[in-house]
Amino acid sequence: ISSVELTSEFLARIQTLNSGLNAFITLDEEKSLAQARDADEMIASGRSMPLTGIPLAQKDIFCAQGWLTTCGSKMLSNFVSPYDATVIERFNQAGLVNLGKTNMDEFAMGSSNETSYYGPVRNPWDLSAVPGGSSGGSACAVAARMAPAATGTDTGGSIRQPAALCGISGIKPTYGLVSRYGMIAFASSLDQGGPMAKSAEDLALLLNLMVGFDERDSTSLQRDIEDYARDLEKPIEQLRIGLPKEFFAEGMSTDVASAIEAALDEFRKLGATFVDISLPNSKLAIPVYYVLAPAEASSNLSRFDGVRYGYRAAQYTDLENMYKRTRAEGFGEEVKRRILIGTYVLSHGYYDAYYLQAQKLRRLIAKDFTDAFQQCDLIMGPTSPTVAFDIGEKCDDPIQMYLSDVYTSAASLAGLPGMSIPVGFGKKDRPVGLHIIGNYFKEAQMLNAAHRYQ
Ligand code: GLN
């Protein structure tokens, strides 16, 4: 099958399904097919690389040259990127095809895709349920087979939680492995791009293309190239799996608990052993995250002022008034809430009490993991405390929404790699995800364990 045929198949499926699911917010069939033709030429002339010709969906947080890049916001509703993010550039060079840009929570702030200016995404398993967020469009696109794979970004759980809620696989690599250049910033010390796909094997192949040093990202890590698919088939008899008591406590719903128990049983059958561990400070992850992430966001989002690019209010009296109206009209409610929290915790007189305190706790949360990895190789637990909730269910209760990330945000604060794989179904036949946390740079080991299970 040629890339043009493959791409056309997926584009046709998108045409049929997207009006009901709202996973894609920008499509450009001509651009996609032109890329597919180029890929076919690469293959014909013997210049093909792994995955050349494979189409994939791009989260709309990644700048792609000539493509509308909105980040789910009215603020960037007219922004056509003049350049490619490093991630996009790498996929282009390898001859992959961009199928379109996927819906997301506005500026990646959310856990349900309901903060998007472009409307909610529906969960393909149950149209009344959310797909999770913020990479909800990408998760939906893969789950509904509108794309074989997609990119996502994860600041506190945004790859893993939607992967779990949509019954697909997703991995957030160690912080610093995937370049953030051209990935619109939310909380720079936490943001990390990664792949979302059907299986761990697909994730490994995609990760091989995404990871690499980039001098345009000052936090990019310089490391030897790894093949993330190298260990997929390795037996896991020696594997020690840590089960943090804090992740198996109250809060997790019983349907999720039984799916997780069943998955752990499979790992036992594959020869893995289990170790009880403790991450005593992980209960502080959500409060710490909601000080630090908004603090960084308030600074990152100050660039959206109506002057340089993006939305500008139609009517204003003077420059100051133009800033105010542009930001009042261009940002949604959740984004404004984060900016207010962020500027508050950074302001003189509160900085020591909130921001500095949170930074110290972040260190303690990371140290818990360092200690735990003395006793085990991987840590497992649920990705999300519940299966997908209904659209509208948590919209008026930000704290409940924030708690969607109770299990994922600690690893984010520590900069550790985390992934979610599908392990069955809970209430209302909605998918459950198993969360796997690895030590720094242990992506290959995580993918190995996930692949053996799958
Ligand atoms: N749900 C979290 C938030 O709203 C995490 C989002 C993300 O990882 N981008 O901030």
Image (spheres, grey):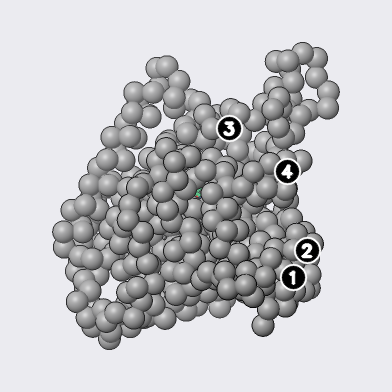
Residue 319 is situated, as x and y percent measured from the top left of the image, at 73, 15
In this rendered view, identify the residue nearer to me: 268 or 396. Answer: 268
Q: How busy is the neighbourhood of tag 3: few (under 14 within 10 Å), some, or many (20 plus)?
A: some
Q: Residue at x 45, y 20 (%)?
A: 347
Indicate which disc residue 11 carries. 1
User: Can residue 405 be spotted in the picture?
Assistant: no
Decide which of tag 3 and tag 4 comes sooner along the chain: 4
Residue found farthest to the right: 315
- The residue that label 4 is drawn on is 80
Q: Is residue 304 left or right of residue 450?
A: right
Residue type, numbered disc 1 = Leu
Q: CA distance from mark 2 to mark 3?
A: 31 Å
Q: How busy is the neighbourhood of tag 4: few (under 14 within 10 Å), some, or many (20 plus)?
A: some
User: Can residue 202 be spotted in the picture?
Assistant: yes
In this rendered view, identify the residue nearer to me: 200 or 384. Answer: 200
Q: Residue at x 44, y 24 (%)?
A: 346
Indicate which disc residue 29 carries. 2
Q: CA distance from mark 3 to mark 1?
A: 34 Å
- The residue that label 3 is drawn on is 301
Q: Residue at x 76, y 29 (%)?
A: 312
Decide which of tag 2 and tag 4 comes sooner along the chain: 2
Q: How busy is the neighbourhood of tag 2: few (under 14 within 10 Å), some, or many (20 plus)?
A: some
Tell us which disc is closer to us: 2 or 3. 2
Q: CA distance from mark 3 to mark 4?
A: 18 Å
Mark 1–mark 2 CB contact (< 8 Å): yes
Residue type, numbered disc 2 = Glu
Q: Secondary structure at mark 2?
A: helix
Q: CA distance from mark 1 to mark 2?
A: 7 Å
Decide which of tag 2 and tag 3 comes sooner along the chain: 2
